Image: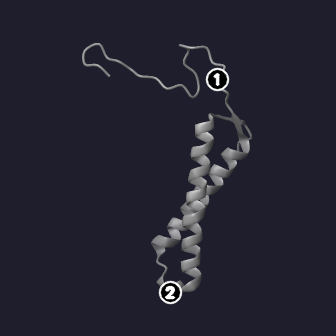
Amino acid sequence: MVSEAPVLLTEDGLLQLQGELDMFRERYADLARAKAESPEDVDDGTLTDMTLMQRRMAEIEDLLTRAMPLDISSREPGVVGIGSGVTVRWEDDGE
């Protein structure tokens, strides 16, 4: 089932996904090149890795297509929301 719902992402979240996509594209291209140059050296594990990479790249591309940047600069101080960083302190032993 493909969702068309928007995905709220912070600027950091967008950058992380784009970085992950770039990394997978580079690794996939390397494996595809190795497969083309000497297919006899490619094992089932490599083919499985390539399939998993294709799936993850498609997921990331879908997320990036539906991404809605979240502006956290206008958030009220002290209010937790999407993209907030929080620290939990326990009464008995700190953080």
**24 versus 93 height, above or below:** below
Question: Of the residues shown, which amino acid type is indicated by label 2?
Answer: Glu
User: In the drawing, what numbered circle is on residue 40?
Assistant: 2
**Mark 2 or 1, nearer chain start:** 2
Q: Is residue 95 left or right of residue 4?
A: left
Q: At x 63% / y 25%, what residue is drawn?
A: 72
Q: Residues within 10 Å of mark 1 (few under 14, many from 20)?
A: few
Q: Is residue 67 visible?
A: yes
Query: Based on the displayed image, in which of its 4 quarters is residue 63 positioned?
Result: top right
Image position, residue 69 (x, y; %): 69, 34
- The residue where tag 1 is placed is 73
Of circles 2 and 1, the one toward us is 1
Q: At x 41% / y 22%, what residue is drawn?
A: 87
**24 versus 83 height, above or below:** below
Query: Based on the displayed image, in which of its 4 quarters is residue 73 positioned?
Result: top right
Give the CA distance from mark 2 to mark 1. Answer: 54 Å
Instruction: Pick the residue in front: 85 or 5.
Output: 85
Give the SS element for disc 1.
loop
